[in-house]
């Protein structure tokens, strides 16, 4: 049964304390609180640095079994190596503890910088490298290098399940229809966003996942979503659910504290009591 998986991109924001988070809530309880009010979360920390298996394990322990934790792929892969010669970096990423999430592991989002333009060969080679199951990820993780000593590496899947991948592109050249064809070939989704920058607006789910990242429609990372806007996003969710996709929506308009409230408001529209 397709699900609505709606939440926030990150949860450690001081401005949420005493607002979304109850006054006095311990920082160690913030993820658990998010999991009590939403159905999923997107992790930002995995974009900036390799985490530890103990960290992924703690995230799993703090959330219910049905909760989904999506991850942002390493910026070392996307922004520094720019998708080229990334085999070792991918092995290290998957060995860092990703598999410790078990059945909670959601899609992995590979966010490209706006300076990467549509290049069929580059994108094709990158997508072909991505593991599509926990078993494939475990085999890839076993190839990690000395940056991850044995005590910091996790290579054994806890469950046998598919791994979904999502690409967020930020250059207008990706509106080329050949990009959509390539995504279909690899069964990878493109992020749907409505950011107030000249990023391409794409609506390209995979065969199983539709994925949106909402950065703030009029002011980047800041705007609150109006009721009418959330009504539109609820229709988008229902459309792709009816088509058999799990729908992921993550709010990133966090700078003024609107993200968690907007996530709850959308979830109420999609999954009313």
Image (cartoon, rainbow, N blue to C red):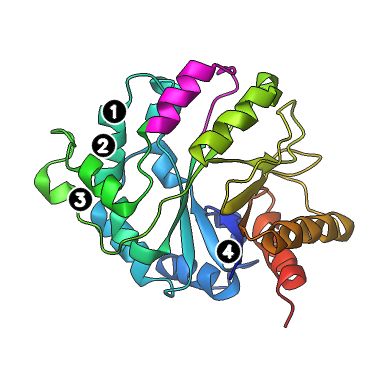
Disc 2 crowd rating (10 Å Cα; few below 14, some 14-19, many 20+) is many
Q: Which residues are magenta?
A: 111-128
Residue hosting label 2: 91
Q: CA distance from mark 4 to mark 3?
A: 36 Å
Q: Are marks 4 and 3 in contact (CB under 8 Å)?
A: no
Asked where in the image residue 239 lies, by quadrant, the reply is bottom right
Asked where in the image residue 74 lies, by quadrant, the reply is top left
Q: CA distance from mark 2 to mark 4?
A: 36 Å
Magenta run includes residue 265:
no
Q: Are marks 2 and 4 in contact (CB under 8 Å)?
A: no
Q: Are marks 1 and 2 in contact (CB under 8 Å)?
A: yes
Q: CA distance from mark 1 to mark 2?
A: 6 Å
Q: CA distance from mark 1 to mark 4?
A: 40 Å
Q: Which one is in front in this view, the residue at disc 1 or the one at disc 4?
A: 1
Relative image position of residue 15 (x, y in whole percent): 61, 56
Regarding mark 2 in the picture, which secondary structure is present there?
Answer: helix
Regarding residue 252, the answer to whether it shows in the image is: no
The residue lying toward the viewer, choosing from 228 and 83, is: 83
Relative image position of residue 210 (x, y in whole percent): 63, 51
Q: Which one is in front in this view, the residue at disc 4 or the one at disc 3?
A: 3
Magenta run includes residue 114:
yes
Q: Earlier in the sequence, mark 3 or mark 2?
A: 2
Regarding mark 4 in the picture, which secondary structure is present there?
Answer: loop
Q: CA distance from mark 3 to mark 2?
A: 10 Å
Residue hosting label 3: 155
Q: Earlier in the sequence, mark 1 or mark 4?
A: 4
Name the residue located 20 percent from the left edge and 51 percent from the top edge: 154
Relative image position of residue 64 (x, y in whole percent): 44, 75
Residue hosting label 4: 17
Q: Is residue 37 left or right of residue 32?
A: right
């Amino acid at each position: 049964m397709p699900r609505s998986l709606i939440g926030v991109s990150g949860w450690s924001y001081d401005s949420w304390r005493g607002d979304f988070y109850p006054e006095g809530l311990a920082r160690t309880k913030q993820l658990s609180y998010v999991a009590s009010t939403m159905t999923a979360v997107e992790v930002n920390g995995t974009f900036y640095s390799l985490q530890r298996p103990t960290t992924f394990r703690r995230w799993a322990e703090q959330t219910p079994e049905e909760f989904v934790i999506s991850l942002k792929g390493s910026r070392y892969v996307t922004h520094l190596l720019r998708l080229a010669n990334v085999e070792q970096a991918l092995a290290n990423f998957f060995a860092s503890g990703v598999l410790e999430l078990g059945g909670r592991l959601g899609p992995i989002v590979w966010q490209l910088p706006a300076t990467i333009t549509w290049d069929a060969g580059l994108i094709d080679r990158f997508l072909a490298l991505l593991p599509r199951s926990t078993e494939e990820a475990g085999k890839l993780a076993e190839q990690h290098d000395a940056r991850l000593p044995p005590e910091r590496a996790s290579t054994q899947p806890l469950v046998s399940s598919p791994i979904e991948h999502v690409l967020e592109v930020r250059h207008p050249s990706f509106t080329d229809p050949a990009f959509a064809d390539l995504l279909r070939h690899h069964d990878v989704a493109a992020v749907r966003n409505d950011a107030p920058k000249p990023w391409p607006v794409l609506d390209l789910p995979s065969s199983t996942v539709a994925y949106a990242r909402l950065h703030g429609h009029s002011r980047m990372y800041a705007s609150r979503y109006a009721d009418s806007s959330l009504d539109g996003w609820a229709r988008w969710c229902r459309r792709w659910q009816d088509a058999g996709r799990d729908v992921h929506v993550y709010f990133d308009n966090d700078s003024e504290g609107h993200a968690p409230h907007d996530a709850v408001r959308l979830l109420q529209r999609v999954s009313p009591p």
